[in-house]
Each structure stands twice: as C-alpha cells, then as structure tokens.
Image (cartoon, helix red, strand yellow):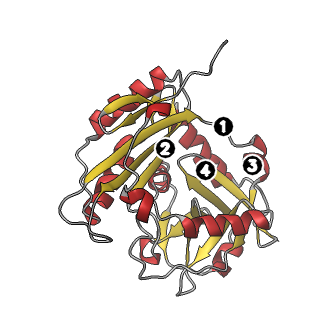
C-alpha cells in the first residue's frame, strides 16, 4: 500500500515530519494568540524578500518582548532546505513565532521559551482572470482604531481580519477595505491598497495605522526606480472611488487590480496602465 509522504517542517531548531510535531498545550500562541507570523512566497526554490520579512518579524518581536534569535541568513538556509526536502519550487512559506509556554496567567512569570515554526506548501496560483478583469471590494462596517497598538504588526490575533474577510466573501467580493475611526482609508483585510491619480501612485500613510507590507515597500521602490511619482498620504474613501486605478498588494497575490468597490466601477481600464507596469516589474524581480 502506498502512503502519502508527510511534509517536513522546521520546529524549534529541528527538521521534523509534520505529523510528528509536538508542542505544549499551554503554549501562549494557542491560549492568547500571543505571537507573530510572516507569509511569503518562494520562486524557483528561493524565498523572495526574506530579509524584509525577517526584519519586520524581528521588529515586532522586540516590540512585544518575544525572544527571537534567528538571522535572515540562517532562515534562508532553513527555508531552502525545506523546499528541497518537500520537493517545492514555487511555494507558500509561513513563519510562526509564539511566546511559548509560560505560567502565571496573562503576564507570564519570567522569560518564556518561544515556539518557532516554518512550514511550506505548494502555492496555488490566483486565477488569471483576477489579473485580467480585476477583483471587487466592499467597505467593511468594522472600523480600525487609530490607537490600536497591534494593527501595525502581523500578530496571531487575526480574528478581526477574519470577520472583515468573511464580510467581503459573504457579499461576493474579494476583500474588504478598512476605514479607521478618523474615516481614513487604511488597508484591506489581507492586503495593502494603492490608487493611481493622473499617473501618480498613492498609498495610505502608515499614520493611518496599518501593516507596513513587504510588497507595499517593493512597489514604492519600483515606482522610484521607474520614475513614477509615489506618495504616502491620509485620505478618505471618496478619493479611492474617484481614482483612475486601484490595486492591491501582498506577498502572495503580488499586485492585483481592483475593478469595483461597493458595486461602483473604478477607472476606465482594468488593469490600468500603471498597475500593469508595476505588476510586470514585480514579476521580473521574482524571476
């Protein structure tokens, strides 16, 4: 009888079979969502922009006082080994960091020993139609507090994002646009958002309280390299609805055009000229 081979993962300094993973039932990541994560893509057996993902993870770990001792150089070796052992080239990669086991309730006594996991799996490509005709958005009824301290970090406390994404899917949309309590556009449930006005690329400022996306950063770099004026600003929904182009970014979808928001058509051409240019430039980087 032929049995399916188990995936290999990296757990706390060791390569182990996924089916053999063991961790404490009182791990704080499980009990409280007390942890962080990063998702990225690997192309041709190489993790893309790993340095940026690790830098963001290190910054957040420092902010939340979660011990983390891995370097980007070490993790690159680990991920490439995982990809080889799991026979993957173009893949989804996730790094998960929990504060680990701790006693004494919400505020643990002493220093916890963190749990760190990396797992990989085949990446199912988004439908080509999403890039040809664009995706739809709705505006979530859930507002983002401008003082929420975790919104700029990729934490395991992801239930609010789940509710926003569920709200979008329930209305037949791809994602939900999030406004903050000052009526400023922030991002979407699982992506950053960009708009184009008269060949100028604009994305919400980090001051709106949003995740500093790695792909967001790459797009801003590409704008600079290709002499496309780009800025980070504070603005409301009406400006997005009036834009010539709107597109979304994250490490999995790359750059994806938006065709409608709340049922209203965006721009005259989907994908727009700037969106297509940046998408092509991004793809060139990955190859």
| Label ID, residue 221 | none
Q: On the picture, is 194 further left or further right than 100?
A: right
Camera sees residue 15: yes
Cα separation, mark 3 vs mark 1, equals: 14 Å
Q: SS for tag 2?
A: strand
Nearer-the-camera pick, 119 or 266: 119
**Which residue is label 2 attached to?**
40
Q: On the picture, is 235 further left or further right than 9?
A: right
Camera sees residue 197: no
Q: Where is residue 64 drawn, in percent x and y?
A: 29, 65
Q: Where is residue 158 drawn, in percent x and y?
A: 52, 64
- For residue 3, what is the image quadrant? top right
- Upstream in sequence: badge 1 or badge 2: 2
- Upstream in sequence: badge 3 or badge 2: 2
Nearer-the-camera pick, 106 or 85: 106
Q: SS for tag 1?
A: loop
Q: SS for tag 3?
A: helix
Near mark 4 (Cα within 10 A), the count class, few <14, some 14-19 or many ≥20, is many
- Upstream in sequence: badge 4 or badge 2: 2
| Label ID, residue 255 | 4
* In this rendering, the label closer to the viewer, 4 or 2: 2
Residue 47, placed above or below residue 196:
above
């Amino acid at each position: 009888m032929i049995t399916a081979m188990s995936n290999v993962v990296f757990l706390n300094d060791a390569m182990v079979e996924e089916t053999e993973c063991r961790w404490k039932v009182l791990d704080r990541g499980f009990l409280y969502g007390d942890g962080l994560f990063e998702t990225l893509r690997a192309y041709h057996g190489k993790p893309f922009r790993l340095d940026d993902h690790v830098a963001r993870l290190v910054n957040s770990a420092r902010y939340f006082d979660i011990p983390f001792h891995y370097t980007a150089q070490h993790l690159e070796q680990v991920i490439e080994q995982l990809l080889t052992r799991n026979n993957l080239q173009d893949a989804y990669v996730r790094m998960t960091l929990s504060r680990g086991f701790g006693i004494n309730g919400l505020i643990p006594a002493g220093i916890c020993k963190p749990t760190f996991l990396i797992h990989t799996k085949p990446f199912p490509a988004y439908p080509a139609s999403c890039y040809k005709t664009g995706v739809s958005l709705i505006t979530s009824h859930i507002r983002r507090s401008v003082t929420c301290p975790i919104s700029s970090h990729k934490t395991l406390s992801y239930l609010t994002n789940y509710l926003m994404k569920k709200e979008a899917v329930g209305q037949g949309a791809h994602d939900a646009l999030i406004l903050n309590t000052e009526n400023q556009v922030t991002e979407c449930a699982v992506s950053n958002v960009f708009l184009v006005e008269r060949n100028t690329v604009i994305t919400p400022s980090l001051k709106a309280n949003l995740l500093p996306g790695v792909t967001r950063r790459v797009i801003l770099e590409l704008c600079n390299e290709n002499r496309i004026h780009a800025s980070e600003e504070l603005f409301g929904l009406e400006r997005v609805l009036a834009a010539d182009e709107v597109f979304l970014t994250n490490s999995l979808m790359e750059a994806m055009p938006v065709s409608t928001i709340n049922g209203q058509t965006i721009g005259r051409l989907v994908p727009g000229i700037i969106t297509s240019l940046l998408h092509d430039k991004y793809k060139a980087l990955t190859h």
